[in-house]
Each structure stands twice: as structure tokens, then as C-alpha cells.
Image (cartoon, grey):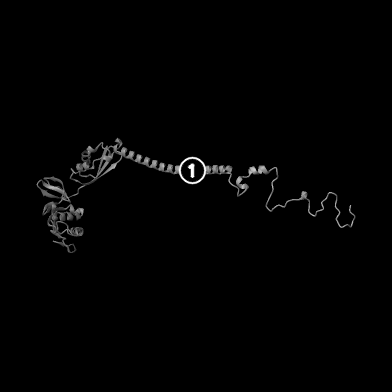
Amino acid sequence: MLPAGAGGTATAPGSSTSGTPSSDTHTPRRRPGSFSLPKRGAKAAARDTPETAKTPDAPLTARAARGRLRAARRARKQYERSEVRRFTSRSRRRRNLWIAAAGTLVALVAFVLVGVFSPLMALRTIEITGTNRIPAADVAQALEGQLGTPLPLLDLAEVKGQLSEFSLIRSYVTESRPPDTLVVRIVERDPVGAITSTAGFDLVDAAGVVIQSGPDRPQGYPLIDATGGASGPGFQAAVAVVRALPEGIRGQLDTVTAATKDDVTLTMGGGARVVWGNADRSEYKAIVLGALIVSHPVGSVTEYDVSSPDSAVVR
């Protein structure tokens, strides 16, 4: 022991005389954010941590490269599978559309073939309408050659030829009524008067078509005497006058004379004459003539002059 008050500092035996701490008690200072692993868990942590996460700038190892390759292959296969699904879905839609269109076309063709060639559509009934002077049974009998023919295959040209034999038919319309009926709607010619001919008298319509011929004059129709016959302008003027007359006056009419288209004269059953002139304003002239006949009945006068209907004259 040193005596107190000596210039040194008393120390315990075995202790260092230096002013710095002993190396056995030194503790290194940690940097902020750093940590140290326990010695026992260091290897386990190294196994659990990916190679790329250990050190950002560490070189790529074979193990990490194989892992990346496997991941890339999996992503590639997944992408390919999704593309295949997308492509096959589009192809299926297109295929379904084509199948539906083809099925519709086949069904339509089958329907047409069945409708055209099937015995179910064969003609069995002929229905005639609109006839008055023509016996409907005669028209149906003329068309019997079409029986047994499928409705879509009817020979309309032959039908026209068969109906043209009836002079009273002015026009007609045919209608196929499935499954087995043909309807023929006929419009007959309307007689307007009779003209003299080599056979005696011909009953004609407004077009001059002969409806019937015979030695006797047809009853209920006026005799038309027109220069140039049924094809001349006088005949057309006479027909226009006759068709403008009301039924009551037309029934009293005996003859119609047309020297020209501007000189039409009527003769009533009682012998009275009607000076008509041309066919202009025939409807108005017919009204005036009707009023004159009411005020001056047929038999009481010899002549009605309506050639100027605004100043009609009775003689």
C-alpha cells in the first residue's frame, strides 16, 4: 500500500493503471437500423431468406436462376392456357352461328320441297266465285286438268287458256288456298247493247266484245246503230251515253244512233226522241233528262233536246 497523499493513485492489486476501460468490458456501438442475429439462428435465417433478399447487389445464384425460370414457365403456361380458352371460345361461337345458319337453310329447303312436291299440297278442290251468266260448274270442269297438281306447280298459262274460252269472262284472279284448294274469282263482262250482225244480233259489252249471238234481239238492251260498227268512235260515244243513264231511263231505251261521236240520238220505247249531241257532260245531261221526263212524261212529247243541258228544250 502506498501512503496517503502520495503523488499516485492507489489501485487494487491486479487492476490496470490505465485510464481506459478494459478490453473485456468493451461493447461495440450499433449503427441505427442495424441488427444482429443470434449465433444459433443465423444459419436457419440464411436458409429461409431468398438469395436476392440477402444482399441487394449479390450475384444471381444457380438456385435463384432456376427458381426464376420455373416461375417464368408457369406464367407462360398460364398465359397460353388463357389464350387457348379465349381463341376456342370465339371459335365455338363462330361454329355455333354457322351451324344455326346451316340448320335454318336446310329446314327452309326441306319446307319448300315438301310444299312443292308433297302429295299433301295436291289440288283437289276448285272453287269458282263471281259468276252470274256463266255456270260455275262449267268453269270448274274446264279446269279439271289441273287436279292432282301441287299448288305451287299449277300451270297458270294453261289456266288462262282454258278460261279464255268463256267470252263472258272479262277478268279473273286465282288464289291458292293450302293445302288443296284453288279459288278463281271471275269478273263477267257487262252487256251494254246489241248490234246487228250476220248471225242476227250480237250482245256486246262496252269494249265491243261479243258476249252472245243469235237471230233474236236480246231483251232489255238497246239496239246500238253506230257508223263504223263496234270499232268506230260513234260506238264509244253511244256506249258512254248509255252507261251514264240511270237504270230507270235505260230500261225504257229502245235504240241509240250515233252517226258521229258528236251526234248521238236516243229513241225511247214510246217513240220519243232524245237529242243528246256528244258524250261530254253525259252525267249532267242524264239528270236534266230525268227531270224533263218527270215534268213531261214519255208519250206526252215527241222530243227531248239536252244537247245544251243548261237550256234544255221539250218539243
Picture quadrant where residue 249 is located: bottom left
Residue 151, position in %: x, y? 27, 40
In the foreground, 77 or 261: 77
Residue 259, position in %: x, y? 11, 57
Which residue in the protein does label 1 denote?
A: 80
Q: Is residue 201 visible?
A: yes
Task: Name the residue at 13% across, 45% down.
Answer: 213
In the foreground, 306 or 196: 196
Query: Residue placed farthest to the top in the image?
Result: 119
Q: Quadrant of the C terminus?
A: bottom left
Q: Is residue 145 left or right of residue 87?
A: left
Query: Residue placed farthest to the bottom in the image?
Result: 311
Q: Is residue 217 left or right of residue 85?
A: left
Measured along the vertical axis of the image, is residue 314 above or below residue 126?
Answer: below
Q: Which amino acid does the dot numbered 1 rest on?
A: Glu
Measured along the vertical axis of the image, is residue 6 above or below residue 156?
Answer: below
Task: Name the residue at 77% across, 50% down.
Answer: 23
Q: Is residue 183 left or right of residue 297?
A: right
Q: Residues within 10 Å of mark 1 (few under 14, many from 20)?
A: few
Give the number of callouts: 1
Picture quadrant where residue 114 is located: top left
Measured along the vertical axis of the image, is residue 107 above or below residue 278?
Answer: above
Query: Residue placed farthest to the left in the image?
Result: 198
Residue 32, position in %: x, y? 69, 53
